[in-house]
Amino acid sequence: MTPTLTALLLLGLSVGPRTQVQAGTLPTPTIWAEPGSVVPWGTPVTIWCQGTLESTVFYLDKEEHVGLWDVHFPKKPGDKAKFSITHMRDVYAGRYHCHYRSPSGLSESSDPLELVVTGSRGKPSLSALPSPVVTSGGKVTLQCASWEKFDRFILMKEGEPRPSSTLDSQRPTSGEFQARFPVGPVTPGLRWTFRCYGYYSNSPQVWSQPSEPLDLLVSGLEKYQKILIGVSVTSVLLLTLLLLLLLLRLQHQKKCCKSGALHPEAETRAMHKSSGSSSVAPVQEEKQYAEVREFQLDEDKQMDSRAAVSEDAQDVTYAQLISLNLEQETSAPPSSQAGEPPAESSMYAALAVHEPRNYPHPAFQEEDHRDPKTQ
């Protein structure tokens, strides 16, 4: 910074309050940080200072730092100025103020901006006592603990720019350093996610790494979620059952078509046809029966004719044999031995076995009563 600029700044600061008192019209500037005032180590951050449209110079101050921290001269009059930090370090952590100058004079300082850097120490642990499940409207205790000797612990709620609470560290007998934060009443519909940090008293803007996030579950909301899950599962099961029934029905119809089964309407028409022709059925049955009976009678007649022919053939054969025997018997000489019957008679007896018993031949009967010696 050149001596001329320093002299001008000092001159402006020295005459600024008197000018502001005389004008009495300059509003207090506003200061904030983007993306937030709690910045992880090594990441960029921007400090904004907003004044009036007539602002010509913006000044940035840091507590415990002698003189101005930074100065911004806009190229044209405007109501905003930004001060960029490309890589956040421990040295940039602290409390900041800003003010501006306009043709009307020098404004007052803004409210402080506490810029915090995190990640310079090890992270603590965060737990809920007795449980992270809380009834709607109930309260719970969150415990932040670490083996590192932090002087204080800070509880941060997600979505809020400022700490929820800050407590001094306590150490039970031979235990971790810890702090217990009461939280509540807890209500549904809000997000209850927390992290905690630890720091030392000589550097309150240099925090440790954040703890793992802890989500509080509101029991009322949990019941509602269970109901929704139950309804969804039931709907899926019903849909699956309907699809299964549809597939089974289609498969049954395919089997019926392959086996030649009629459609229910076709079966109904067939039943009507059969009922209409029921009066003709007995006549057809009688005709069929008469034809079968006539066929059987023809068969019986043919069998009888065959039997008659066979009997006639036997009679003729027997008659021929009898006549032949009679001729031989007439020409043959009488037996030399008295009392012995001729051999032909035994032949006749053998032939008589094949003659029907009910109809003996007359010649055979006469032959039995004759005496061969008398001939």
Image (tube, rainbow, N blue to C red):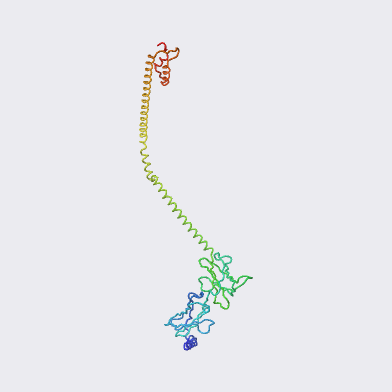
Taking 297 as reference, is 7 left or right? right
Asked which quadrant contains residue 296, the reply is top left
In this view, 173 is above or below 304? below
Counting from the top left corner in percent of width and height, residue 73 is at 45, 83
Spot the residue most to the top.
374
In this view, 43 is above or below 243? below
Taking 144 as reference, is 233 left or right? left
Counting from the top left corner in percent of width and height, residue 62 is at 52, 81
Asked which quadrant contains residue 300, the reply is top left
Counting from the top left corner in percent of width and height, residue 91 is at 52, 79
Counting from the top left corner in percent of width and height, residue 105 is at 47, 85
Spot the residue most to the right.
173
In this view, 89 is above or below 220? below
Q: Quadrant of the C terminus?
A: top left
Looking at the rendered structure, the number of numbered marks drawn on it comes to 0
Q: Nearer the viewer, residue 199 or 345?
A: 345
